[in-house]
Amino acid sequence: MLALSRKKNEALIINNNVEVTILEIKGDQVKLGITAPKEVPIYRKEVYLQIQESNKDAMHTENLEALKDLF
């Protein structure tokens, strides 16, 4: 993991096309602004993990149904 220090209104660039800017720091919260191409999905980690779990569940269910159809 790369750990960087940034102050309000400072930014970092990821992969030449994603910019993350520190918009506000209030107590233990940091507000980020993210500029990225529309085709780059951006999720909060907890939402991303829920999507991944749902996809795994759906794939497992679809595979079972496909197997049932074969027999």
Image (cartoon, grey):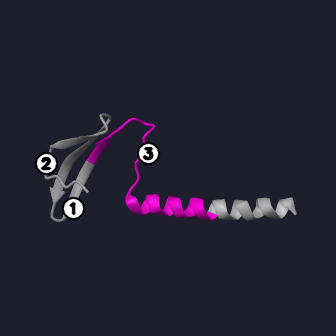
Residue for badge 2: 8
Q: Is residue 67 left or right of residue 25?
A: right
Residue at image location 43% in from the left, 36% down from the top: 38
Q: Secondary structure at mark 2?
A: loop
- Residue 41: image tag: 3
From mark 2 to mark 1, how far is it between C-alphas?
Answer: 12 Å
Q: Quadrant of the N terminus?
A: bottom left
In percent of width and height, residue 26 lies at 16, 60
In percent of width and height, residue 22 lies at 20, 48
In percent of width and height, residue 69 lies at 84, 60
From mark 3 to mark 1, how far is it between C-alphas?
Answer: 23 Å
Report the amino acid beneath label 2. Lys
Q: Earlier in the sequence, mark 3 or mark 1?
A: 1
- Residues packed near mark 1 inside 10 Å, few (<14), some (14 to 19) or many (20 plus): few
Q: Secondary structure at mark 3?
A: loop
* Most foreground residue, 18 or 38: 18
Report the amino acid beneath label 3. Pro
In percent of width and height, residue 66 lies at 78, 59
Numbered disc in front, either 2 or 3: 3
Image height of 48 relative to 15, above or below:
below
Q: Secondary structure at mark 1?
A: strand
**Stretch of the chain drawn in magenta:** 33-57
Q: Are marks 2 and 1 in contact (CB under 8 Å)?
A: no
Q: Quadrant of the C terminus?
A: bottom right
- Residues packed near mark 2 inside 10 Å, few (<14), some (14 to 19) or many (20 plus): few
- Residues packed near mark 3 inside 10 Å, few (<14), some (14 to 19) or many (20 plus): few
Residue at image location 82% in from the left, 64% down from the top: 68
Residue at image location 64% in from the left, 61% down from the top: 58
